[in-house]
Amino acid sequence: MPKTMKAAVLHKIGDGLKIETVARPATGPGEVLIRVTACGVCHSDLHAIEGDWTPHPALPLIPGHEVTGHVEELGAGVTEFAKGDRIGVPWMFWSCGTCEFCLQGMETICLKTEATGYSKPGGYAEYMVAPAAFCGHIPDHVDMYAIAPILCAGVTTYRGLKRTGAKPGQWLAVIGIGGLGHIAIQYARAMGLRVAAIDVSDEKLAHAKRLGAEILVDARGNDPGAEVKEKTGGGAHGAVVTAVSARAFEQSVTMLRPAGAVSFIGLPGGDADQIRLSIGQIVNGEYSIRGSNVGTRQDLNEAVAFAARGQVNADIETQPLENISAIFARMKKGDIRGRVVLAIS
Ligand SMILES: [Zn+2]
Ligand SMILES: [Zn+2]
């Protein structure tokens, strides 16, 4: 096995990624060495390399947290995987397993959690290491490129959907039909929910319709909340917001049926990070507003299982690692349909 590998590396916030030859990582106890096949490019990776979030990522950084590959080497004590197994690595690299949140199955909010491609090196590289206990198994027949975005976009939308508490036959409003939203519609449909899709683009609404959304609402209209209420006969039971404008988050509450719940999934960041809501409306309607932060290992396994059965498919475009800077330039312009996946080996 080579002692070095090709990777996209960030040395300084704002300097962009450089393709370099670096040392291949070595496994510690409980870790697996993975030969990376594919890695999805997520908007969070752009936030990481531009330093939009605090704390900043650990430098030098190899981003990437939608990783699929094959197990190449086992660290001491690994029992979850065998050499050659197909493996997936999500955003949640590790959590402590012993704090009050981990013990309640809420490992997504563990305060000691480590993040793949942020606090730990990720999958924009030929090899990476990860704790075996936090990786997912990828079934044999599944396309390793197509499944990559499910490890982040899939898990995130799936958990967000579950956290609305909406039940089969009820209405779910999906607000923002982009990289996350087009996947949210498919999970909702697979879970027996009826979908109202809300966006500001005719093309994205048409896409939502093809994916099975029954109601399409153009948020450029006067009152998208009233329109959703009218078309669903009283409002959505649940809503997920994947959009990147603060206004979309504000409008989401107006789309709900009394006692409805909305999950906030998107992260607009910067100036768009603040919203204004009517307290009276929330009190009187007994609405719930919930954050949803990626997913647990159980969410990961369930989300992958839906996709492995063919019920959820991410729209992907594959690109070589060398094109990463051009991909981020397109992402900044909103010029990406679905998800870009780096084809690494
Ligand atoms: Zn992500
Ligand atoms: Zn913990």
Image (tube, rainbow, N blue to C red):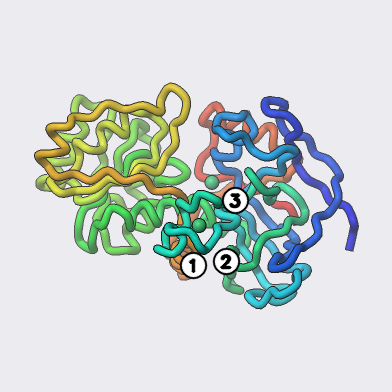
Tag 3–tag 2 contact (CB < 8 Å): no
State whether residue 328 is above or below residue 64. Answer: above
Sequence-wise, which precedes: disc 2 or disc 1?
2
Residue 286 lies, in percent from the top left, at 14, 45
The numbered dot on residue 136 is: 2
Residue 62 lies, in percent from the top left, at 71, 43
Label 3 crowd (10 A; few <14 / some 14-19 / many >=20): some
* Image point (55%, 39%), residue name: 44
- Please name the amino acid that badge 3 sits on: Glu
* Image point (61%, 34%), residue name: 56
Residue 77 lies, in percent from the top left, at 71, 75
The foreground one among 331 and 206 is: 331
- Please name the amino acid that badge 1 sits on: Asn
Q: Say what secondary structure mark 2 lies in.
A: strand
Extreme residue in the top direction: 271
Tag 2–tag 1 contact (CB < 8 Å): yes
Sequence-wise, which precedes: disc 3 or disc 2?
3
The numbered dot on residue 301 is: 1
State whether residue 33 is above or below residue 41. Answer: below
Label 3 to label 1, Cα distance in Å?
19 Å
Residue labelled 3 has its Cβ within 8 Å of some atom of ligand 2: no
> What residue sits right under mark 3 in the picture?
114
Q: Where's the N terminus, which quadrant?
A: bottom right
Sequence-wise, which precedes: disc 3 or disc 1?
3
- Please name the amino acid that badge 2 sits on: Gly
